[in-house]
Image (cartoon, rainbow, N blue to C red):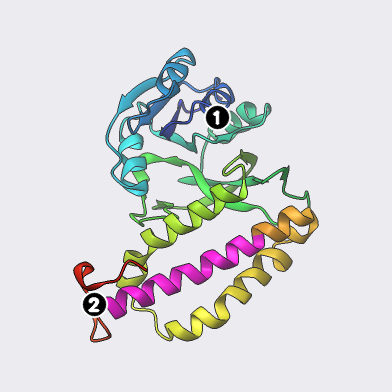
């Protein structure tokens, strides 16, 4: 039985170091779309060499940018990837088999993480996301960060693992934690979470235990320990920045004007 044609969709910005491997891993696709946010490096040239259709649009936010890229796809079925992700060599036949007579509206794929200087341990829990879906029955969630594909219909798991290279060093991961925690203030403020001071005190320890012990990243040695500590710091920042935002907008002490502040 002939499989449904597949569009691969990738959003990118200054990813010349990873976009080639990403697109080479999906050379089997019927259509490849790259939506670039205005890269200054060779990202677009590399994408074109791999046969991708390249469009350029100013960054509209993680969720909106991905939705714009999905809307550029030619085919109904879409595989959504980040530019620092790639598929294993045997992914093509598995995806085509899933699309031969798809009963689901979307498929969940697993993701293996690069942790600073090594891959996560084989027995550590992998993240999982809907990445293969019928775009006529799916949309992006609209979140500022940690955006996801929302599917209107049944979802099944597909035995394909995405390799995610992500941040290559501790500095990059800490920078991302700082950036993402700032973006999450708007999402979390809309939900009006309670007991923020209690969350600041206790939730980082819970986040560390969940990442390091329950998800099994202790198996990655010191790389897993450092990653868990950064993850706990990120958990703290999310609530600390929300607390700061609420204090700044409430009746608490106001920051003095710059002209009245000392240089120290």
**Highlighted range, magenta:** 228-248
Residue sitting nearer the eye, 136 or 109: 109
User: Which residue corresponds to the image point at 45% horizontal and 68% vertical from the top-left?
Assistant: 238
User: Which residue corresponds to the image point at 49% horizontal and 52% vertical from the top-left?
Assistant: 176
Residue that numbered label 1 is attached to: 18
The C terminus sits in image quarter: bottom left
- Residue furthest out toward the front: 263
> Residue 20 at x, y = what percent?
54, 23
Residue 116 visible to the viewer: yes
Left/right of residue 61 with respect to residue 166 in the rendered view: left
| Tag 2 near tag 1, CB within 8 Å | no
What SS does tag 2 mark? Answer: helix
Q: Residues within 10 Å of mark 1 (few under 14, many from 20)?
A: some
Asked if residue 256 is positioned above or below residue 183 in the image, the reply reads below
Residue that numbered label 2 is attached to: 249
Q: Is residue 236 magenta?
A: yes
Residue 104 visible to the viewer: no
What SS does tag 1 mark? Answer: loop
The N terminus sits in image quarter: top right
User: Which residue corresponds to the image point at 49% horizontal and 38% vertical from the top-left?
Assistant: 82
């Amino acid at each position: 039985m002939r499989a449904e044609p597949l569009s691969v969709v990738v959003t990118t910005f200054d990813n010349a170091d990873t976009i080639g491997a990403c697109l080479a891993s999906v050379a089997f696709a019927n259509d490849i779309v790259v939506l670039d946010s205005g890269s200054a490096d060779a990202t677009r040239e590399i994408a074109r060499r791999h046969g991708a259709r390249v469009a350029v649009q100013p960054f509209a936010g993680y969720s909106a940018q991905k939705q714009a890229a999905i809307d550029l796809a030619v085919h109904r079925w879409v595989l959504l990837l980040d530019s620092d992700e790639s598929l294993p060599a045997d992914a093509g036949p598995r995806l085509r088999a899933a699309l031969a007579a798809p009963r689901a509206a979307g498929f969940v794929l697993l993701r293996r993480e690069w942790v600073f200087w090594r891959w996560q341990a084989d027995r550590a829990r992998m993240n999982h996301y809907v990445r293969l879906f019928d775009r006529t029955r799916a949309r992006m969630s609209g979140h500022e960060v940690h955006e996801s594909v929302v599917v209107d219909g049944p979802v099944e798991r597909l035995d394909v693992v995405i390799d995610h290279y992500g941040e290559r060093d501790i500095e990059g991961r800490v920078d991302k934690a700082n950036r993402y925690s700032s973006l999450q203030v708007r999402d979390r403020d809309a939900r009006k979470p309670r007991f923020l001071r209690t969350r600041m005190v206790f939730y980082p320890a819970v986040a560390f235990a969940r990442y390091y012990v329950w998800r099994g990243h202790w198996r990655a040695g010191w790389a897993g320990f450092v990653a868990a500590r950064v993850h706990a710091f990120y958990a703290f920042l999310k609530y600390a920045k929300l607390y700061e935002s609420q204090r700044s907008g409430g009746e608490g002490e106001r920051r003095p004007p710059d002209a009245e502040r000392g240089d120290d």
